[in-house]
Image: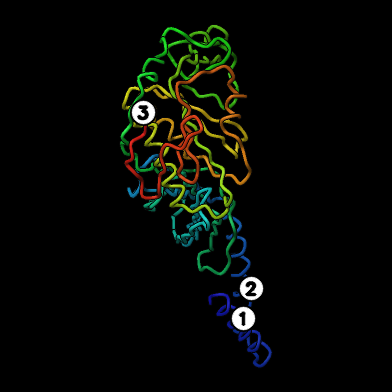
Amino acid sequence: MRKIAYLILTAVSIYLCIMYDGAAPFYLLGFLILLALVLYGSSWYLRAHLRVHLNVQIPVVEKGQEFPVEIWVENTGILPMPKIRLTLLHDSDYVGKPEKKRLILGIGPKKKERQKEKFTMKYAGRYYFYVTEARVYDVIRLFSKKVSVRDDNVFVNVLPTIREIPVEVDPRTRQHMPDSDEYATDRKGEDVSEIYAIREYRPGDSMKTIHWKLSARMDHWMVKEFSFPQGVQVLLLLDLYTASSKNFREEEMDALLGNFSSLSYSLAGKGVSHVAAWYDDAMGELQRCRIDDEEGTYAMVDQLLAAVPYGWKYDIENGYDKEYPGEIFAASLILDTEGKLRNNGTVIAEFSTEGQEQQVIV
């Protein structure tokens, strides 16, 4: 509307210049042209001085819990920005259509402001947030420029509902108790009580694994790799194959994540050490976590939420054996996307989207 009004006013001034004598119409036309040039130039200036990024202070929340996503907007220039239009999207790897939210902001010169947008997720999963478009307008909103936004890769892990499932542990499984002093000599793990190897830092390594004393002595960063204890009692696998991965609904994935996590939680509650593993199709590799207690289950879930169903057949049990040969477990449990739980190939329980409390024997 503002551009239309400006064009109409310009057209009227041109008409007056043609139809009437005198300097006033020419002064008006000159002013309008000069104004357009100044505003157009200021729009480029504002574009160069706008910074936008996202931040999440609480990256893990429970399902149904409200959480904020912070939008930080900074004006590094000396001109005010009366209108900034942002398009904020959020989605997950198994959401059919991303949800969009339009935001209108304003900020003064040399200022940095924060706005919080609150969200509540109905289903568990890893939800990504990003700004797809940022547009800044001049002082009378005649011209606007699109601003590139830094890719912050902001996400929030929404935890599934983890409940206790009745688990009965077979005496033979109990007797498969590992010796805590025995560690694998051919592969690393997550047990911080024993160091498997020390090597130079590689991009992507966690700062928690830095060997500070050795790094100071070597004058460059060194990291610790931890050992993997032998003799884990149960192998818990998640088979994410589905014949209709594109139509795998949020509520189905929510139930699958909740059932798998609840199985791990219940095994840990019974004192059953186990390894949880699944194939990460996005990374193209098998993921696994050793779990000895309920806290270990929540650490596993933090990684599991990045997993997505895949539409090609992958033998998760055979894949695990090839990746980690020689490991012996008292029981091998496999949960598939249909909710069927198998123990050494035999279906022992079936889960629905509503969950179930049928006893599980391992």
Tag in front: 3 or 1: 3
Sequence-first tag of 3 and 1: 1
> Could you tell me if residue 316 is visible in this image?
yes
In which quadrant of the rendered view does residue 143 lie?
bottom right
For the residue labelled by badge 1, is the local secondary structure a helix, a strand or a loop?
helix
What residue occupies the far bottom of the structure in this picture? 19
Q: Give the image location of residue 113, x and y in percent.
A: 41, 49
Residue 39 position, x and y percent, is: 58, 65
Does residue 84 sit above or below 332 in this rendering? below
What percent of the width, then of the height, locates residue 247?
A: 54, 55
The residue that mark 1 highlights is 10
The residue labelled by disc 3 is: 267
* Residue 112 image point, x, y percent: 43, 47
Residue at x-position 51% and y-position 68%: 140
Compared across the picture, whether 15 is left or right of 290 comes to right
Disc 2 to disc 1: CB gap under 8 Å: yes
Q: Alpha-carbon neighbours of circle 3 within 10 Å: few (<14), some, or many (≥20)?
A: many
Which residue, given by chain and number where applicable, does mark 2 sit on? 33
Does 195 appear above or below 142?
Answer: above
Q: Is residue 55 visible?
A: no
The residue depicted at 61 percent of the width and 37 percent of the height is: 314
Query: In whole angstroms, how far apart are the C-alphas of marks 3 and 1?
Result: 76 Å
Q: Quadrant of the C terminus?
A: top left
Amino acid of disc 3: Leu
Q: Tell me which amino acid carries mark 2.
A: Ile
What crowding class fits label 1: few (fewer than 14 Cα within 10 Å), some (14-19), or many (20 or more)? some
Which amino acid type corresponds to the residue marked 1 in the rendered image?
Thr
**In this view of the protein, which residue sits in the foreground, 313 or 145?**
313
